[in-house]
Amino acid sequence: AQSVTQLGSHVSVSEGALVLLRCNYSSSVPPYLFWYVQYPNQGLQLLLKYTSAATLVKGINGFEAEFKKSETSFHLTKPSAHMSDAAEYFCAVSARTDKLIFGTGTRLQVFP
Amino acid sequence: EAGVAQSPRYKIIEKRQSVAFWCNPISGHATLYWYQQILGQGPKLLIQFQNNGVVDDSQLPKDRFSAERLKGVDSTLKIQPAKLEDSAVYLCASSLDAWDTYGYTFGSGTRLTVV
């Protein structure tokens, strides 16, 4: 069975500061891992995905994530936060041919 | 390409009433998913269709929820009768096939409030 744990339901950063959103996964098989972003009253938008190629994955809007098998982690980072990054972020895992399992989400607030 | 269309965007009903949601996936996408997103939680899969057949409905409360995908295109999700705990956003997603986890496209969702 697969699961993900997102540490911290709320994260606040200042504009220009580093963004770090944490995700740990559990999977009985080599996983596919994803980060999605959700803006208010909108659906989920794919930020990036890991599918067993390069362990450092670059996504849209300057975000990237690193797959660390030894730590079972897939943390999302962005070097410099922008006001427009304020949203809900979801980590998700899939056993490749199976459905997406989502974490509980992390709400990112960006202060000027 | 057009995205996943869902309607209505918002719905308010009283408990014990019935409600239906509609989803039109991206053209050519064989797999369709309905997710339930309760406030403060991540989306949870309710049902997955491959064309017009059900692949996974293990988390669908079948005593009150039903879903169909006639002709392998549009889909409807129905709740009858609704309970207060059904208040949530119902998200529809589609992908080329069940193994295309690269390419889930989500609709904007239907926000249901049960009072």
Image (cartoon, coloured by chain):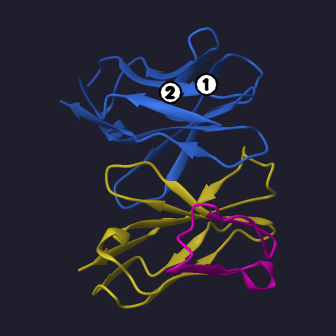
Outermost residue toward the top in this view: A70
Left or right, A96 with reference to B84? right
The chain letter corresponding to blue is A
Tell me the quarter of the picture where residue A88 sits. Answer: top left
Query: Callout 1: helix, strand or loop?
Result: strand
Residue sitting at 76 percent across and 39 percent down? A96
Q: Residue B20 placed where, x, y %?
A: 49, 86
Tell me the quarter of the picture where residue A108 sits. Answer: top left
The chain letter corresponding to yellow is B
Q: Residue B11 placed where, x, y %?
A: 35, 82
> Does B88 appear above or below B13?
above
| Quadrant (top left, top right, bottom left, bottom right) of the C terminus of chain A | top left
Sequence-wise first label, 2 or 1: 1
Q: Does the magenta stretch include residue B99?
A: no
Query: Callout 2: helix, strand or loop?
Result: loop
Q: Residue A38 or B14: which is nearer the viewer?
A: B14
Q: Which chain carries label 1?
A: A
Residue sitting at 66 percent across and 53 percent down? B104
Q: Which chain carries label 2?
A: A
Left or right, B1 with reference to A11? right
Left or right, B90 with reference to B46? left
Q: Is the residue under label 1 in contact with that under label 2 (CB below 8 Å)?
A: yes
> Does B64 appear above or below A73?
below
Q: Disc 2 marks which residue?
A: A63
Q: Disc 1 marks which residue?
A: A58
Question: What range is drawn magenta here?
Answer: B47-75
> Does A112 appear above or below B73?
above
State the mark number for residue B78: none
